Each structure stands twice: as C-alpha cells, then as structure tokens.
Amino acid sequence: MVAFKATSAKVFKLKDNKSTLPYLLLLPGLLWLVLFFIVPIFSLGQMSTKVAGADTGEFVQGYRFANYIDAFSASKEQFFRSFLYGILATLIALAIAYPLAYAIAFKSGKWKNVLLVLVVAPFFVSFLLRTIAWKQILGEKGFVVPTLRSIGIIGESTTLTSTSFAVVMGMTYNFLPFMTLPLYASLERIDPRTIEAAGDLYANGITAFRRVTVPLSMPGVVAGTLLTFIPAAGDYVNAAILGSPNTKMIGNVIESRYFKIVDYPTAAALSFTLMVAILILVTLYIRKAGTEELV
C-alpha cells in the first residue's frame, strides 16, 4: 500500500512537471513580448494624447484624442501614398520572386544552394548602403539612365531619381528576399509527383501550373506578401534617399515629427494610426486568403 502511494505521488509529480514545463518554456518569449512590444505600445498610446507644456519639448498628459484627427488630416496624403507604394512594391516583388523561387526549387539542380546564398546576400550589406547604391545606379552617371535614353525610352531631360519610380523600385529590391524565401520554402515542399499526376490527367504545363502549383504555393504567397507589405508601408529610408518632397511617405512624416519638429504627440498618434491601419488590412487579407494558407 505504501509503495502504491509512493508510485502514485511520483506519477502525479511527473504529470505536474509536464503541465508546467510548456509555460516555463514560454516565459522568456512572454517577457520579451511584454518588454519590447506591450510596454512600448502603452508608452506610445500615452504620448499620443499629450499636449504641449510650458517649455519646448515638454508635454503633459491632457487626454487629447483629437491629436489623432489632426495628425491624420494633416498627413492623409502621405498615408495613402505609403499604402499605394507598399502595394506596388509587393506586387512587383511577387512578379519577380515567384519565377525566381520556382526556378530555384525545381530547375536549379546543384546550383540551388548557390542561388539561395545570392538571394540572402544583400542582407550582409547595410540597408542604408544598398539604398544609396540604388541612387547611384539610377542617377545620371549610372548605366540605367544613359541606356534608356540611347534606346529612346526616356527623354534627355527625364531622370529616374527623386521620383515615385525610384522609391518603389528601391523598396522592391530591399524587400525582395522577404518575398522570395517564403515562396521558395512553399514551392520546395511540393511533391513533383503531383505535377506529374496532372500531366497524366492530360493537363498541359500551363494548366498544371495554374491548378496544382499555384494553389499549393499559396502559403508562401500569403507569407511573402505580408512580410513585404508590412515593412514597405512604414518604410522611410527609400523615400528619403531615392525620393523627393513630393514622394514623402508617412514614415518620413513620423521621423520628421520625432527628430526635427520635436512634436512627440503627433508622431505617436501617426505611429499608432499606421499600426492599426496595417493591422486591419492584414487581418482582412488573412481572412480573405484563409488562415490555413499560413500553415
């Protein structure tokens, strides 16, 4: 009887340890989430309702929620431009990354690892330096503008820098790996026998690609578009280096409000509004695409 009780106590203790172990493993992640997400969001929300104090750079809590309306009204053009540029960059990146990921997954053979290294190689260089390099490539002394002028695509007075084209192309280049890698991971998991089976059912190459490959790669499409659009919509580096005052995005406005004008409440209100807007768009997109596409 005593031995049975001792064994039972050990079993219950083992079960109790197993039940608490997952929570202990989650604890570091939860602490990180609280310290670097919840606390900053709470601080941002507090700052967004403050009003100017007596001294420059001093703000006191006034619970002025009209800051959101004023901030959005003054910067709605930059808001819409940011989402437009983000969508364009995402679509162009998808058009470039899908054939690239498909080629790496199915056609690269022994060169697969080399091509994957080339895809991630830009990450070894600073984001800022890569964007400055694009300014030189698209500039008057680069090879793109003289080439386009020589074949008559653009006029002698036309430039590519300080334009919407340069900003969107810069964003596309900088965030292209975020689109390519999820697409490759999704395509690489497709069993080639499923495509062969489509051929056995008299489907041609285009039909097999449209009815088999694309649906099976949708998890990568959804993940890649999210990983590209979210940072692109809030980006300010590309617009600052490759653009002009007419191509300013909401990230540039927030940066200016924080570091130049020292208008922290407006900057915080814009940041909070941008975060909520992206969250709503992403939620609607995931609901439309289906959450199973992210698995």
Image: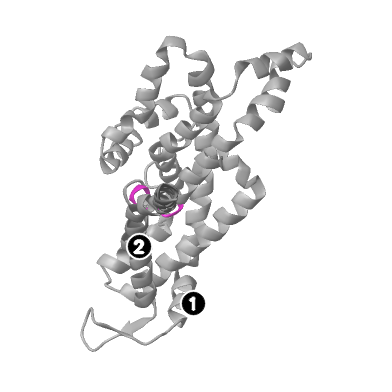
Residue 59 location (% of width, % of height)? 28, 82
Q: Is residue 23 left or right of residue 200?
A: left
Residue 19 location (% of width, % of height)? 44, 52
The C terminus lies in quadrant: top right
Neighbour tally class for label 1: few under 14, some 14-19, many 20 plus, Cα within 10 Å: few
Q: Is residue 19 left or right of residue 238?
A: right
Q: Which residue is mark 2?
A: 34
User: Residue at position x 41%, y 40% from top?
Assistant: 175
Vertical placement of residue 202 versus 171, above or below: above
Viewer-side residue, 291 vs 81: 291
User: Residue at position x 36%, y 77% from top?
Assistant: 46
Q: In the image, which disc is placed on residue 293?
A: none
Viewer-side residue, 143 vs 64: 64
The reply to whether the magenta stretch includes residue 122 is no
Q: Which residue is mark 1?
A: 69
Res. 191 image quadrant: top right
Neighbour tally class for label 2: few under 14, some 14-19, many 20 plus, Cα within 10 Å: few
Vertical placement of residue 135 versus 52, above or below: above
Residue 159 visible, this orientation: no
Magenta residues (range): 233-238
Label 1's element? helix
Q: Among all residues in the image, which is located at the extreme front?
A: 1
